[in-house]
Image: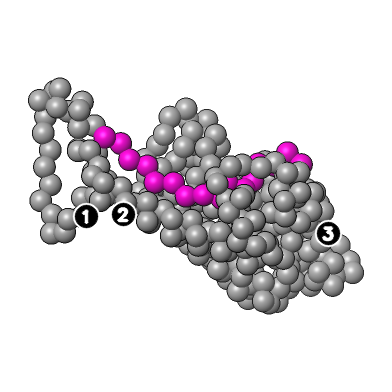
Amino acid sequence: MKKNTKRLVIIIIVFICIIAGIRAIRENMTPAIGMLEIDGPILGSLDYLEVIKGFEENHRIKAVIVRLNSPGGSVGPSQEVYEALLGLKKIKPVVASMASISASGAYYIACAADTIYALPGTLTGSIGVILEFIDVSDGLGKLGVSAYSITGGTLKDAGTPFRQMSQKERQYFEALAKDVHEQFMEAVSVNRGLSGEEIEEYADGRVYTGRQALAIGLIDKLGGLNEAIEDARVRAGLEEKPRIIRPKKPGGILEDLRRLVQTYMPIQIRSNSGTLSGGYLRLEYSIK
């Protein structure tokens, strides 16, 4: 009796494994759409670049959705992801889907897509650049504290908080911000088909709702993730409903806690990659 029971259990387990294997094979044979999720401040690019490369090499993935929910971030990472998506777009359709916010560096990234979707109330745009400095010299002076720098170049300590900024330093930083701002505007102009004059009118750092952005040509269509997926399906020439591949986010529970703290933190936080702001209240494309 016991032997028969063991045999029955083994048969059931084998049967379940076979069914699961068939299902997995069927799913793997079904054409897919990859989803790159950019959530929170953009402080680095390596994880995103790795996902994009994987989507490019996976022949089962026929199109890619870039799901954006970010207030922006640092210049370099935003440009790296933008360039990687431009390369991917030469091989597979790329569709951008904006959630509650996709501004500044996140909007820069969205410009690489074939089509940009936003919700009517999405906050987007914020085409601008910011550099921030503080001056604590007066406060330190009242405390009787002095700070000095010895440099091998006149601008090496430019932006130090321990003294007032000179006119030469201000002009230096203004030139940096202007150059990066021009790069941003050029990317928008080329990908959105807008003239330089139009871009200058819209690129003063202001934020637009999705409906406003549609009216001035910063996005293509109003719609949510479902509409973006359908667009990607059609662009990829898929007749059946595709499966969606979403790479596992790195970091686990600690990363989730970090993002949660950033979202509700009422004060600014310093990090190696730049300045994080209180939640999504600030839209940032930072040179720092």
In the rendered structure, are the residues bearing label 2 and label 1 in contact, judged by CB atoms less than 8 Å apart? yes
State whether residue 262 is above or below residue 233. Answer: above
Distance from label 2 to label 3 (Cα)? 47 Å
Is residue 44 highlighted in magenta? no
Type of amino acid under label 2: Tyr
* Percent position of residue 170, x then y: 30, 47
State whether the magenta stretch is mostly helix, strand or loop. loop
Type of amino acid under label 3: Glu
* Percent position of residue 209, x then y: 70, 41
The residue drawn where x is 73% and y is 69% is: 93
On the image, numbered disc 2 is attached to which residue?
A: 172
Tag 1 secondary structure = loop
State whether residue 257 is above or below residue 288. Answer: above
Q: Depth check: give the residue in front, 52 or 213.
A: 213
Is residue 123 highlighted in magenta? yes
* Percent position of residue 201, x then y: 61, 50
On residue 155, the disc is 1
Tag 3 secondary structure = helix
Tag 2 secondary structure = helix
Describe residue 95's horizontal placement relative to residue 201 as left or right: right
State whether residue 69 is above or below residue 156. Answer: above
State whether residue 253 is above or below residue 68. Answer: above
Residue occupying the far top of the picture? 142
The answer to whether any part of residue 225 appears in the image is no
On the image, numbered disc 3 is attached to which residue?
A: 230
User: Which of the 4 image quadrants contains residue 96?
Assistant: bottom right
Type of amino acid under label 1: Leu
Q: Depth check: give the residue in front, 115 or 236.
A: 115
In what quadrant of the picture does the N terminus appear?
Answer: bottom right
Q: Depth check: give the residue in front, 132 or 69.
A: 132
The range drawn in magenta is 120-135
